Amino acid sequence: MIDSECPSCGDRISVLAKACPGCGVPQQVRMAGMMVAGALALLLVAIVVAIVVVLSWHQLAAAIETGAPADEQFAAGSTADLSWLATAMSGCDAEAKADPGALRFLVTPLVSVAKDAEPWRAKSINDSGQGILLRSDDTLDALKGGALRIYPADYEFRVLDQAGDPVYKWRPSVGVTKFSAADTGAVASFKIQFRTSHGGSDAEWGGSFTRQEGSCHWVNVIIRD
């Protein structure tokens, strides 16, 4: 309690009191006391607002950090010389052989130059949520010929273990990216899914894939927004 000394009797008196409780002399500093009390109330409000802002920031940061980080992102090189992509593929294969217990993927996100997707559907090996999956040779030929190009925006990649139903997910990535999940030896088959900011969060899971232990799974996907 903030108080002061009564100038008449010396008794302690609250700055909010109208008069001294000991002698009844009117309080001269009541207005100042009210100002002090108001300032304290404003300070309390500011503290509460600051706490709310900090908690909201931490919640937002936690939402952004959901999922594991990607292993590596590869800068796209020339489509006339795809040695950079071939190097990424062989490197992922080598890592998979060295650590067969981990589940590894090399994702090459693509976009079709032509608006008509039907020719690509005819070549698809498996429809995946928000994407059309292609064989590596079809992908490389189309990149060299200019029919496909690297998808320029960010995407989210997810994998579903069909037996145990856990979902492996990673933070949004851009371009050719390598993903892995350790200690997944029990995963025998899986489904994959792609999400984009344009497509929303209702993307469907694709068909089933059989896991090839000790191999890097090359995922060449035409992403449909």
Image (tube, grey):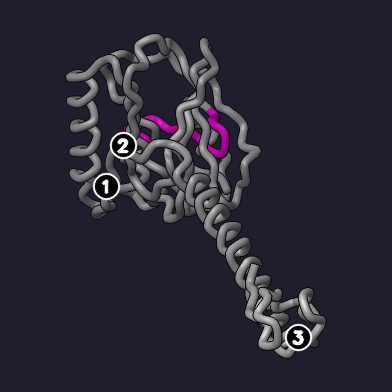
Say whether disc 2 or disc 3 marks the residue closer to the N-terminus: 3
Residue drawn 68% across and 71% down? 41
Q: Does the magenta stretch include residue 109?
A: no
**Which of the two discs, 2 and 3, sits closer to the camera?**
3
Left or right of 208 in this view: 177: left
The amino acid type, in three-letter code, at marker 3 is: Gln
The outermost residue toward the bottom is: 28
At numbered mark 1, what does the secondary structure look like: helix, strand or loop?
Answer: strand
Question: Label 3, label 1: how many angstroms apart (C-alpha)?
Answer: 76 Å
Which badge, 2 or 1, comes first in the chain's sequence? 1
Q: Residues within 10 Å of mark 2 (few under 14, many from 20)?
A: many
Residue identifier under label 1: 74
* Above or below: residue 224 compared with residue 23: above
Q: In this view, does 20 lie to the left or right of 4?
A: right
Specify the quadrant of the image occupied by residue 185. top left
**From what the image shows, is residue 44 above or below residue 175?**
below
Q: Does the magenta stretch include residue 135?
A: yes
Task: Name the residue beneath numbered marker 3.
Answer: 27
Which label sits in the foreground, 3 or 1? 3
The residue that disc 2 covers is 178
Mark 3 or mark 1: which comes first in sequence? 3
Whole-percent x, y for residue 100 in the image = 25, 15
Residue that appears at 52% across and 10% down: 163
Query: Contact, CB < 8 Å: mark 2 with mark 3?
Result: no
Q: Which SS class for mark 3?
A: loop
Magenta-highlighted residues: 127-138
Q: Do the residues labelled 3 and 1 touch (CB within 8 Å)?
A: no
Judged from the image, the secondary structure of the residue bearing numbered disc 2 is strand
Q: Which residue type does callout 2 highlight?
A: Lys
Q: Marks 2 and 1: CB-CB under 8 Å?
A: yes
Q: How far apart are marks 2 and 1 (CA)?
A: 8 Å
